[in-house]
Image (cartoon, helix red, strand yellow):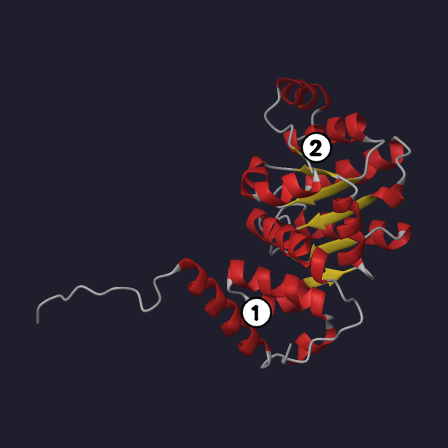
């Protein structure tokens, strides 16, 4: 039987995106866990599912502090610096959103001083990079976004405390992935954010990625004009 060439059933980018989110919305109705989240949290969750195709892992492991999304939005609108652990996040973030809200993405992972400080202090480069980033920008609003290196979380928390940073101007998005330090670092971040009432979005457990970190930020940006924290997801919105 001869091989016959085919074309994609849907071949327009915008149409593919719309259909993808329609499918996610429909499938979410099969998960009782989904009703526990408000409409803005569901929007973030949908983006994370769109990025990973993992319904159960996202729904069972996602953690939001109270009003995390609107509070992160406020920081973005205050021109918060977005301090990240890897350049993959920096490259992945929409330049349109960054320009619109005046957010600069800071990643010092490949700076010469980072190599020097990491070697001197016997830390990872991610640890050294975030220490320097927080010290330099400690008087400005900041969102600390981690998608790869759990040592970033320890460094961020410890430096915020050591430098006496105003924690009312800080938020966390924590999605490091892997095996060593990962679960422990997220637990440390969660306890810190709950204790100091810091807005945070965290994927608990080993699951995560830089692309999911980017997806969370993009969903949060997109919702700035649509925020309604009292709405609850009912599968019909």
Side of 60 relative to 210 (left or right): right
Number of marks drawn: 2
Q: Choose top left, top right, bottom left or bottom right for residue 158.
A: top right
Quickly name the residue at label 1. Answer: 55
Using the image, tell me which numbered label, if any, was put on residue 143: none
Q: Are marks 1 and 2 in contact (CB under 8 Å)?
A: no
Residue 142: image x %, image y %? Answer: 77, 39
**What's the residue at 58%, 50% (across, down)?**
209
Out of 27 and 233, give the one closest to the viewer. Answer: 233
- Going from N to C along the chain, the mark reached first, 1 or 2, is 1
Where, quadrant-wise, is the N terminus in this rendering? bottom left
Q: Who's the residue at 73% across and 61% down the image?
A: 63
Identity of the residue drawn at 68% across and 24% down: 118
Q: Position of residue 234 (x, y in %)?
A: 68, 80
In the rendered view, tell whether residue 200 sits above or below residue 33. Answer: above
Which sits in the foreground, 143 or 160?
143
Along the line of sight, the residue nearer the viewer: 18 or 92: 18
Front disc: 1 or 2: 1
Work out which quarter of the rendered image holds the C terminus and state it: bottom right
Task: Categorize mark 1 by other alpha carbons within 10 Å: few (<14), some (14-19), many (20+).
Answer: some
Residue named by callout 2: 127
Element type where label 1 sits in the image? helix
Which residue is situated farthest in the left direction here? 1
> Can residue 97 be seen from the camera position used here?
yes
User: Where on the picture, by quarter, is residue 222?
Assistant: bottom right
In this rendering, the answer to whether 150 lies above or below 229 is above
**Residue at the spot 82% in from the left edge and 43% down from the top edge:** 170
Closest to the observer: 133 or 223? 223
User: Residue 104, position in %: x, y?
Assistant: 68, 34
């Amino acid at each position: 039987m001869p091989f016959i060439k085919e074309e994609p059933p849907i071949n327009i980018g915008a149409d593919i995106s719309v259909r993808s989110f329609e499918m996610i919305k429909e499938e979410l109705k099969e998960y009782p866990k989904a009703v526990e989240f408000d409409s803005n949290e569901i929007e973030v969750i949908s983006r994370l599912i769109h990025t990973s195709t993992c319904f159960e892992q996202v729904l069972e492991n996602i953690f939001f502090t109270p009003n995390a999304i609107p509070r992160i939005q406020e920081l973005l609108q205050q021109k918060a610096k977005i301090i990240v652990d890897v350049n993959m996040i920096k490259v992945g973030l929409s330049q349109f959103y960054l320009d619109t809200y005046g957010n600069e993405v800071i990643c010092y992972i490949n700076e010469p001083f980072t190599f020097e400080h990491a070697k001197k202090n016997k830390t990872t480069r991610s640890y050294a990079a975030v220490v320097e980033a927080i010290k330099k920008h400690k008087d400005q609003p900041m969102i600390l976004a981690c998608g790869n290196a759990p040592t970033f979380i320890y460094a961020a928390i410890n430096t915020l405390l050591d430098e006496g940073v105003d924690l009312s101007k800080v938020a966390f998005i924590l999605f490091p992935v892997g095996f060593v330090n990962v679960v422990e670092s997220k637990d440390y971040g969660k306890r810190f954010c709950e204790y100091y009432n810091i807005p945070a979005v965290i994927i608990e457990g080993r699951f995560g990625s830089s692309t999911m970190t980017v997806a969370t930020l993009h969903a949060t940006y997109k919702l700035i004009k649509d925020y309604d924290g009292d709405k609850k997801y009912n599968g019909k919105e």
